[in-house]
Amino acid sequence: MRKIRYHKEMGMYLPDDVRPQNKGYGEAGASWRKRAVKGFNAPSGSSHEDIDFNNYTLRQRSRMLYMAAPVATSAIKTNRTNVVGVGLRLKSRIDREVLGLTPEQAEEWQKTTEREFNLWAKDKRACDATGMNNFYGLQQLALVSWLLSGDCIGLIKQYPVTRLLPYSLRVHLIESDRIATPGGYGSGGSVTYTTGRNPDNGNTIYDGVEVDSNGMVVAYHIRSNYPFELGAPTTTWARVLAYQEHTGLPNVLHIIDTERPDQYRGVSYLAQVIEPLLQIRRYTESELMAAVVESFYTAFIKTEAPTDENPFNQTDPDVPGEPKGPNDYSMGPGQVNVMAPGESVEFANPTHPNGSFDKFVAAISAQVGAALEVPADLLLKQFNSSYSASRAALLEAWKAFKMRREWLADDFCRPCYEVWMSEAVARGRIYAPGFFDNPTIRAAYLGSEWLGPSQGQLDPVKEITAEILACSEGFSTHEQSTIRLNGGQWDANVEQLQRENEKLGGNAPDPHQNGSGSGGPQQPQEGEEPAEGDNNPHSPENARRRGAEALRGLIISEQIKQSIQGGTANESTT
């Protein structure tokens, strides 16, 4: 007869002849007999069990750390400043070949559209349903809410049109907590039971997000108030379709970064580092309090005489109603306490400030920064490394910033732009023939880039030199280099430079300024002798060629210095 015994590691009853044997990963990370991992019990369920059931707690803790832990505040605000900054600006990029437009016509259409969009985006009354932020302020709010809460919800609303507000489109951002499974639809009354079912159509609801049998999001369930809000009226629920039935335009903007398949709600940006951030905060508070106590000069007097007759510490009469207790002692600058007979005070004698405090915080911050994709140099705003190390850290951080910027543009900016464009074309304020008839033409008109703050330069001379050389060799365009260097607009810069050069004497702009790069030899002025051929120093072509050669020589010489000195050239003086 087969003996069945309880298998402690597997947590089940198994016959002796079918007890599992360690093979493959069973001898590695999945081993249940190695001491290193024997006690590593790591239960995991579906994305809804692992994420939705715990989101309420994660949001509360992340928000509290943002409000009370400096490192967490830095992580969120560093992302806000670099991803959005003062706002992601629209740069229309239509596909003129599909639309059959000339370069001049395409440029004129794009400028007109950008000007018309700013009419809506810059006025907080025109774009925000609450009237608190313009479109660029909404971007900042959406990003911070997304990072803290895991996702952010924007509702598309329509308001009456006025003479000064020609568009009805409004965006209403709400807390992610207000998207939840309605009471009675879920599997329990607790906030952790987030999965339910719509009794009207049988669709499953995952923490307020309703999906059909194919897993496609079809609607959102929205509370009328924040959960457990004090003084709030009775909660009512609204079911909002994800997309309009007739136009297909979005009704709900869901800004989210998913990490698992079948995931419909986001996870807080700080979720993986909540524990170390909390411990850093506690450690910092302890060190701060210890340093403050250490700075006090407090005296304790022992005496056999009656303590109620000693004049110490009696500069002011006792406040009525606040008698001093028999064991009430305090510490402070110059504080003197008279102790009762037989009492004594003993203190530990720690040395503060702790010499290892900075190293410990920096080490933990480095791990936190690695998880958040923000290097410790940038997280703590301490750039004490060499130029090459600081630049490498900045470049690594900007990979994450650009990625989140594109996600924000895809989930928030471009959907808003599409809804706005549809209204602008329908009202006749933007001329876009075929916009509603052909999806290919529609997509061609909706092409856009969203430009935010530039990366900045640690060494402007080196980085601007590299951009000029890249433009001269065709590796980059003037417009791309301008965006990378300062986030500006090259076309506007050229026009401004032309006007400035005219005011400075009517001379033609420098070839690097007007972007020609091949203006050909200049004609000699009246009374001047023409210079000979290629040696003419006033020729724009010669100026461009000599500038490129000088830049190449500068970069090659710098590379030679770094090779000779082991890559540390000029780092000590940078």
Image: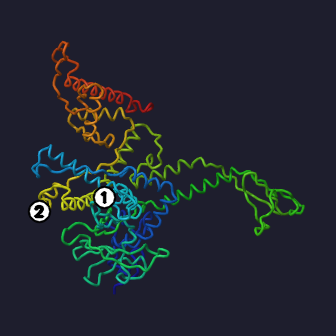
Q: For residue 40, which quarter of the picture? A: bottom left
Query: What is the CA distance from the residue labelled 2 to the residue labelled 1?
Result: 30 Å
Which residue in the rendered view is the most extreme toward the left? Answer: 100
- What colour scheme does the image use? rainbow
Q: Position of residue 538 (x, y in %)?
A: 22, 20
Q: Which residue is mark 2?
A: 437
Which residue occupies 16% across, 57% down? 443
Q: Position of residue 523 (x, y in %)?
A: 16, 20
Comparing 19 with 333, the one in front is: 333
Nearer-N-terminus badge (2/1): 1
Image quarter of the C terminus: top left
For disc 2, the neighbor class at 10 Å (few under 14, some 14 to 19, many from 20) is few
Q: Position of residue 385 (x, y in %)?
A: 45, 39
Q: Which residue is mark 1?
A: 164
Give the left or right position of residue 63, taking residue 323 as reference: left
Circle 2 or circle 1, nearest the eye: 1
For disc 1, the neighbor class at 10 Å (few under 14, some 14 to 19, many from 20) is few
Q: Does 57 appear above or below 365? A: below
Comparing 516 with 467, the one in front is: 516
Image quarter of the N terminus: bottom left
- Amino acid identity at mark 2: Asp
Q: Position of residue 239 (x, y in %)?
A: 30, 76
Q: Does 52 appear above or below 449? A: below
State yes or no: discs 2 and 1 in contact (Cβ < 8 Å): no
- Amino acid identity at mark 1: Leu
Which residue in the rendered view is the most extreme toward the front? Answer: 163
Secondary-structure class at tag 2: loop
Comparing 361 with 145, the one in front is: 145
Q: Does 426 appear above or below 99? A: below
Which residue in the rendered view is the most extreme toward the right? Answer: 305
Secondary-structure class at tag 1: loop
